[in-house]
Image (spheres, rainbow, N blue to C red):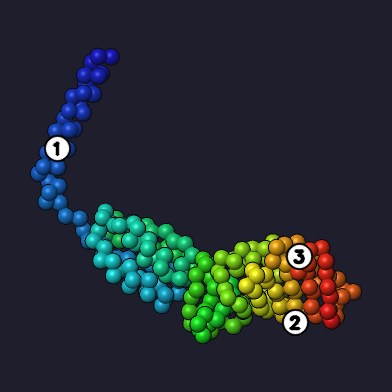
Amino acid sequence: MHQRKGKKILIYFFLFLLVGSINNISLNNLKFEKIKNINVIGLNNEDNIVLLQNIKKLNLKNIFSINKSEISNQIDSDTLVENYEVFKKYPSSLIVNVKKTKFLARVNNNGKIFLVGSNGKLSKNNLLISQLPFIFGSLNIEEFLTFKKIVEDSKISYDMIENFYFFSSKRWDLELKNNILIKLSGNYPEESLQLALEFLYNDEFRDIKTIDARIKNQIILYD
């Protein structure tokens, strides 16, 4: 046992001398190869190029000295990015694999139409998308994403919605593509939506144009 320990100590001692010699002699003169290739994938060609050019502005030197916060901040600033992964390909390449955000709705922001992404960011409506529902009111994106989750958990299809109306009281109305308006409670949005849908899918009320569910456990119908 003592002989084995003695051999291990000798091995560690020689390794220490070897590493020390390398540090003193070689590493001072060692130069890592600069990053030569950055490949961005996941968006369309034009948007990939835009993100690529923004990353290149960081003037990254080599893959061993990348500032993770710096490159993350640059990628996160792109409103089209939902999430991403950065892979290092040795010795001198980076691969940025992006998942594009999903556009959920349109909104007027200071006179311009923007797209609301599932990442909680606004993107320019460069594609002139018109089939998405429109949001009226002073938009709070977090409020919208929270309410959209309520809609998704209900029996209503998102494709049925023509417009969202958001009020300062943090209450929502839904206008459907068949021109039916659903008025929901601000305090009990889940319960009021569920109650409203019971009448929406009831053939006895097919001529109804407005379902008012703002008061808890109460429905008012207008034709």
172 or 30, which is in the foreground? 172
- Whole-Å distance between the Cαs marked 1 and 3? 72 Å
- Whole-Å distance between the Cαs marked 1 and 2? 78 Å
Contact between labelled residues 2 and 3, with CB atoms less than 8 Å apart: no
Q: Which mark is residue 192?
A: 3
The crowding category of the residue bearing disc 2, from other C-alpha atoms within 10 Å (few below 14, some 14 to 19, many at least 20), is: some
Q: Residue, x 47% and y 71% (percent of image)?
A: 80
The crowding category of the residue bearing disc 1, from other C-alpha atoms within 10 Å (few below 14, some 14 to 19, many at least 20), is: few
Nearer the observer: mark 1 or 2; the answer is 2
Q: Which residue is mark 2?
A: 179
- Quadrant location of residue 181? bottom right
Q: Amino acid at mark 1?
A: Gly
Q: Which mark is residue 20?
A: 1
Residue 138 in picture, x, y percent from top left: 58, 76
Q: Secondary structure at mark 1?
A: helix
Q: Residue, x 76% and y 69% (percent of image)?
A: 214
Q: Secondary structure at mark 2?
A: loop
102 or 40, which is in the foreground? 102
- Quadrant location of residue 37? bottom left
143 relative to 9, above or below: below
> Where does the C terminus fall, quadrant-wise?
bottom right
